[in-house]
Amino acid sequence: MSSEDLARANVRALTPYQSARRLGGNGDVWLNANEYPTAVPFVLTQQTLNRYPECQPKAVIERYAQYAGVKPEQVLVSRGADEGIELVMRAFCEPGQDAILYCPPTYGMYSVSAETIGIECRTVPTLDGWQLDLDGIAAQLDGVKVVFVCSPNNPTGQLINPQDIRDLLEMTRGKALVVADEAYIEFCPQASLASWIEEYPHLMVLRTLSKAFALAGLRCGFTLASEEVIALLMKVIAPYPLSTPVADIAAQALSPQGIEAMRARVAAILENRQRLIDGLQSLPCVEAVFPSETNYVLARITTSSAVFKSLWDQGIILRDQNKQPSLSGCLRITVGTRDECQRVLDALRDQPGLTATEKQ
Ligand SMILES: *Cc1c(COP(=O)(O)O)cnc(C)c1O
């Protein structure tokens, strides 16, 4: 019997998460993963690597709780928000029996984690403007333990209507958890649902240091939820989810100076985003630019697959969303440095497209 035959059936069938890093992209302008474009400095202060780290480092938890406006008992820190996605499934979903539900087009890890564990994925496609189909969700809730809502949504960039999330929370009360994925909330902080946790004990909010905090390589994320939900997640998390250097750097990022620096980075990215959007709108190959509350912009582009490949060959790596439902012809572009935004605009200017009159 080959190892392939020995593997679990759902793992044999699994398509792993696709990233340009994994695909061996070889660019010098990386605008495919919504990372911050430049590295931020840090120092290592902990020299005690002979000892195991704290499971939930106190300084990190307390600083994040203060930053997010919740109690420390309502915070869990993990190896990226991606680990939070997996923990909620492992704590709440019985493989082969329960289901998760999400609304495509959206973030790819909900299905990858569910399929790895052997949990059914139920999908209810979004409506106009990529908003929730609440009737469709209501009709599909039987057997669903966790509903994932990404707001602002990746890859489309817009917020989910808060009243719809409230209706979803009422609909799921006592039946299922609702996970609000707020990976990009620093770019629109007023939209956070963290303050709703008191009112809705079945609401979980996912956060990360990978985007506005410029620490994707650190692998550090947070789950905010009621004390009861956090206690359940604590039962299934690894004993030492964060290494000592990770906790050390995360605590620095969450110091008052760290948060101030993050806010300055957000302001710079928002400026570059406007410049990128304005530039895109004037290009012949760009059919539509969608509004964004995040550090990326989704655009519909004439012959997008050929354009994607042409830019890839020039070392400019974007994210092709063409295969996602309702996103045919769409590319997602991370807002990089001012120079990187200009490189993309210059490369796109050379692509075939429509004249202004043809566009109308
Ligand atoms: C980037 C991203 C994450 C993952 O964050 P990590 O902390 O790097 O694991 C989760 N959700 C969404 C929507 C993201 O875009």
Image (tube, rainbow, N blue to C red):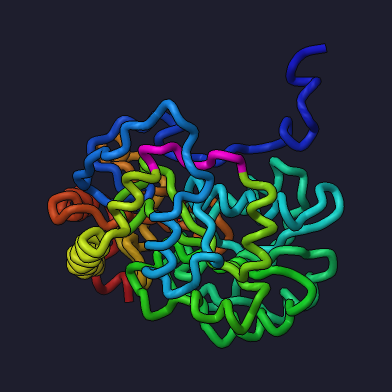
Residue at the top extreme of this rendering? 1
Give above or below for 301 relative to 247: below
Q: Quadrant of residue 284?
A: bottom left
Q: Residue 52: percent from the left, percent from the top?
A: 49, 33
Can residue 306 be seen at all in this image of the molecule? no
Q: Is residue 244 magenta?
A: yes
Q: Quadrant of residue 48?
A: top left
Magenta highlight range: 238-246
Q: Position of residue 130 (x, y in %)?
A: 53, 73
Q: Is residue 255 left or right of residue 182?
A: left
Residue beneath the point at 50% across and 71% down:
71
Residue 37 is situated, as x and y percent measured from the top left of the image, at 24, 49
Left or right, 311 with respect to 221, comes to left
Residue 229 can be seen in this image: yes
Farthest left residue in view: 339
User: Residue 192 at what x, y percent from top left?
Assistant: 45, 76
Quadrant of image for the C terminus: bottom left
- The number of discs equals 0
In the image, 44 versus 94, the foreground residue is: 44
Viewer-nearest residue: 133 or 48: 48
Q: In terms of secondary structure, what is the magenta stretch mainly? A: loop
- Residue displayed at 39% across by 55% down: 59
Say which quadrant the N terminus sits in: top right
Horizontal side of 307 relative to 83 (left or right) equals: left
Residue at the image point whose x is 45% and y is 32% from the top: 22
Residue 231 part of the magenta segment: no
